[in-house]
Image: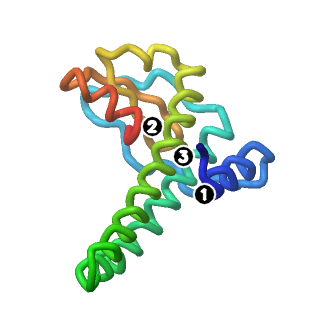
Amino acid sequence: MITKKVEHHLRRVFSGEYECLNAPDEDVQLGEVVVGTLRNEQAKALFSIVRDIGKNLDLNTKDLERRFHAATDKEEQRQVFREIHQIKNQVGVIMGLFWEMVYEEYPQGRDRELDVGIRRDWQVVVYKATSPLSGIFGELFG
């Protein structure tokens, strides 16, 4: 089941309402090969949303930690944990959709021998996977 917050974000993206303001800012690294430039505006918007969520999460992390440690019972701690878990799941859903869009343009990204990343100016890069699981984690955090 998709949460209302994720559904709201997706509606904005696919209706063209969401303006992409948080482009990737990392430079291409040694060992990475640029295979092209991401053109899909909806994918760019999804990437931007995840960056927005991440910034908000960074701002709220200290508050969540404080609430967790100040909780007087286990139920309060569980509630904070659920909030963190919900945010993580929302990011996972949006990033999964983002990577599917990237792979539509650059199918070589599905090769489990390679990791894929998005760099400054929406450059799509591939590089040798460091472990069998790194491709899986790259899908979430590339």
Decide: is 118 above or below 51.
above
* Of labels 3 and 1, the one closer to you: 3
- Is 96 in front, or is 130? 96
Write down the quadrant of residue 64 in the picture: bottom left
List x then y, in percent, for residue 30: 25, 32
Most extreme residue toward the left is 131
Instruction: Say which amino acid is labelled 1.
Output: Leu
Decide: is 35 above or below 10.
above
List x then y, in percent, for residue 61: 34, 72
Identify the residue under disc 1. 21
Q: Label 1's element?
A: loop
Distance from Cα at disc 3 to Cα at disc 2: 9 Å
Q: Which mark is residue 47?
A: 3
Q: Label 3's element?
A: helix
**Of pointers 1 and 2, the one earlier in the residue sequence:** 1
Residue at horizontal 67%, vertical 40%?
42
List x then y, in percent, for residue 16: 78, 48
Residue at horizontal 54%, vertical 56%?
22
Q: Number of callouts in the render? A: 3
- Is 97 in front, or is 81? 81
Distance from Cα at disc 1 to Cα at disc 2: 15 Å
Instruction: Say which amino acid is labelled 2.
Output: Ile
**Of pointers 3 and 1, the one earlier in the residue sequence:** 1
**Of pointers 3 and 2, the one earlier in the residue sequence:** 3
Distance from Cα at disc 3 to Cα at disc 1: 10 Å
Q: Which mark is residue 137?
A: none
- The scheme the figure's colours follow is rainbow
Identify the residue under disc 2. 118
- Is 103 in front, or is 8? 8
Residues at discs 3 and 2 in contact (Cβ within 8 Å): yes
Q: Callout 3 environment at 10 Å: few (<14), some (14 to 19), or many (20+)?
A: many
Residue at horizontal 26%, vertical 29%?
134
